[in-house]
Amino acid sequence: MSSQQGILTVISGFSGAGKGTVLKRLLEKYDNYALSISATTRKPRDGEENGREYFFKTREEFEKMIAKDELIEYAMYVNNYYGTPKAYVQEQLSLGRDVILEIEVQGALKVKEKFPDTPLLFIAPPSASELRRRLRGRGTEGADVIEERMRTAAREALVMESYDYIIVNDDLEECVDRVHGTILAEHEKSARSRGFIEHMREELNSADLKGE
């Protein structure tokens, strides 16, 4: 296990862009990633386990987490809270694992506002027509739902420029490798190497280099 601090990365994308498939393959192909586990006040569904799919909380417990600033971000959907606990993310990062947080665009922008160093990645299809084709290809949603998802995608496209990286999912393996490469590159940013920079400066300023 690397002793280097991990990086929290937020990944979003249109419904139907294939981000779930990309993330599944990313975790299969590379062993240094952890998916962030959300907390929620909704009841567990059959087969779900606390700490695996979600951290299941009572409304009182969740609101205490909000009051204590224990969440990276949170929102309410269909009368239930959903949010990202800081403790789990920080634990994984301290172990040197890169944590992937898959959330929708509004939540992503909240994370960026609170933690400006967090890279935001947006997974997009190569075209709107391909997005529609993929949504139809699922075979699980009617035409009205597909049209609503396309309208939602149009709204989400308005904030795409707020993301640090746009990665087109045309070929799955290429997309997975580009996501991985982007996160690796984030590790090399000078802003994440301040300790090394200071150490190098101190060595250069104190060392007698005449005989080198």
Image (cartoon, grey):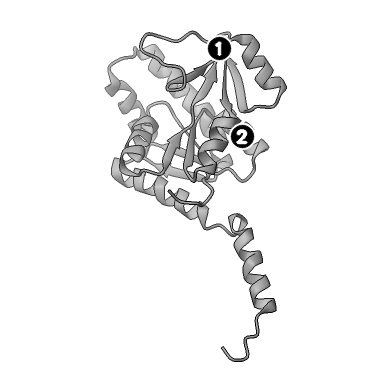
Between 70 and 125, the one nearer to me in the picture:
70
Instruction: Give the residue number, with chain letter if any, for mark 1.
Output: 41
Q: Is residue 63 visible?
A: yes
Secondary-structure class at tag 2: helix
Q: Is residue 9 visible?
A: no
> Comparing marks 2 and 1, which lies closer to the viewer?
1
**Looking at the image, which residue is at 49% across and 23% down?**
152
How far, Cα to Cα, is label 2 from label 1?
Answer: 20 Å
Indicate whether 108 appears above or below 76: below
**Residue 206, horizontal then vertical, whole percent:** 69, 78
Give the image quarter of residue 148.
top left
**Looking at the image, which residue is at 63% across and 14% down?**
61
Left-right relation of 178 to 36:
left
Indicate whether 80 appears above or below 179: above
**Looking at the image, which residue is at 65% across and 85% down?**
208
Query: Residue 111, labelled with which disc?
Result: 2
Secondary-structure class at tag 1: loop
**Residue 103, horizontal then vertical, whole percent:** 51, 29
